[in-house]
Image: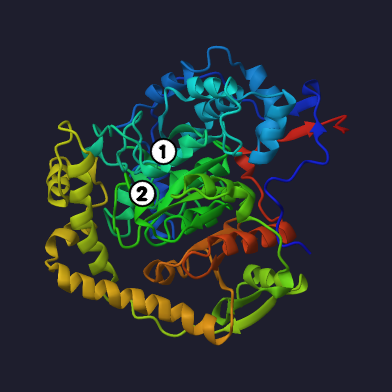
Amino acid sequence: MKLFKQLNKSYVFLVLIPLYACNFTTVYPEFNTWVPYDETALLDSSQQNDNVRLRYKRIQSKTLDRNDLLQTIRLQLDDFTEDKYNKLSAYIYENSIQDIQSYIKLGVLTYKELTQWYLYSETDKNLSLNAIISVNPKAVETAETLDHNTSATDHPIYGMPILLKDNINTADMPTMAGAIALQQHQPTEDAQIVTNLKRHGAVILGKVNLSEWANFLCAGCPNGYSAIGGQTLNPYGMRRFDTGGSSSGSAVSVAVNFAVGAIGSETSGSILSPASQQSLVGLKPTVTSSNQKGIIPISSTLDTPGPITRTVEDNAIIFSAMMTPSMEYQDILGEDNASALKLGAFQNYMKDSLYQHSIEMFRQNGVQIEIVEPPQMDFSGFLTLLNGDMKRDLKTYLNTYASDSVSVRSVQDVINFNSQDSLLNMPYNQSRLDGIVAQELDDIELDSIRQKLIHSGKFYFDVMMDHNNLDAVLSVNNYNAGQAAVAKYPAITVPMGYTEEGEPKGITIIAKSGQEELLLKIADFYEEVSKLRIPPEKFNIKLNIKNSQTK
């Protein structure tokens, strides 16, 4: 069996769908004005949740005017109607990048219409999910320009709308990390990964919510909450299932088809966690300093941006376009033999029926599986490292990118700012920021901790992988994200199925540094034999397609 498909494959057939034949069971209203609702009962009921991270103090933002978001969208939809939205849905909804590109080549869809379709989707659904923080006012204009310049690049990311986590710099939208202290922060240049994406023709659609300061504001607070964006909710179970963090808005947006894909960032689990919680593919690449440029940091030791998508192929396409240096997307997924793979499965996860089923699928399709028991891992100093890095790295970032309109220049400044109105700025506390300023270590002491953790992380995986001659190990969700973080090893998560309650889970594959191509190949193979992703039902557009014609 082929381990993966060629990204630049030529399509043997295309399904042509007559526009009149689509019957949509979900119709979204035209640009309703947002009126804040009384959320008291919802907040009260959330206090009974067994998961403390789902005990909310606030759902709606008290800072962001969602009518401003609607207005930015409305101004870009002057020639786009509900009827056009419905007619184009069959060509866009849940379709892959390559499928969408094939429809554009057929002339049934343009990049402008594609961008408008996604913006139209956001007008109603986003108001209940709190996923989008800001919309690019030039998104449709950019897409229209690309319609007239299609020879500029042959990369499949060309013309594809992408959303960015709100800690990634863009010159045409604020970059706030979800924090009121950075509400006036308007960078004058794009982050390096945004520059790379734009060079290949990607359309930056907007910014998405996140756990404020990338989940380094408060301990134990809900994933997906920020003072700017409010509480992001999981579309598979709003207020029942955790969104995961900190790239919550990135994952939620992709799960409900707000874009072809989104960029998140990870220090330890911040891509793997929300991607698995929203039944998506999330890639945490190897840490490289070049791709950290222009991203609000926690830790220059561990931070790395990565793509979140609905398919492995889309993930490979976006990954190839965002990297420095850029990679040839054709080379990421290539030919190989599944029987040549040997993967490690954790003994203590075998009691998980979804994990066990996934392991069996690998075996039935020729992959060698070795049951392994990892060594003990010493995480002492992990929080100390993050504290020390953020104290230094955030100051460097702010002094490099923040304009005079931003009053904060250090972690202490952020603490002081938040303390002026604690109920508005930090309703759950700011204990993690407090921990940063309370810590006093010099660079030599901090580097000693850094090197010890990196060594411990590598040892954790290398003992298993080298002793058993493994290509990679198989985990669940973000269970081993901490070990992969300090080892600086890449990881990818792929939909593994759903619990009896309907909560998504992901199988997570971890390999050694620089082996993203291997991870994508294994993930592509698993996705092909499993096909377990199901869109969230409440936000599903059910297409009743009749008289499809195969060519």
| Residue pointed to by mark 2 | 211
| Residue pointed to by mark 1 | 195
Q: Which residue is at 68% across, 25% downward? A: 88
Percent across and percent down for residue 24 are 72, 28
Percent across and percent down for residue 95 are 67, 39
Relative to 215, residue 153 above or below:
above
Q: Quadrant of the C terminus?
A: top right
Front residue of 242 and 267: 267
Q: Which residue is at 29% across, 39% downward? A: 176
29 vs 431, left or right, is right
Relative to 6, residue 466 above or below:
below
404 vs 183, left or right, is left
Relative to 80, residue 408 above or below:
below
82 vs 187, left or right, is right
37 vs 527, left or right, is left
| Amino acid bearing label 2 | Ser
- The residue most toward the top is 78
| Amino acid bearing label 1 | Thr
Q: Can residue 422 be seen at all in this image of the molecule?
A: no
Earlier in the chain: of badge 2 and badge 1, it is: 1
Are discs 2 and 1 less than 8 Å apart at CB?
Answer: no
Q: Which mark is residue 243?
A: none
Front residue of 137 and 293: 293
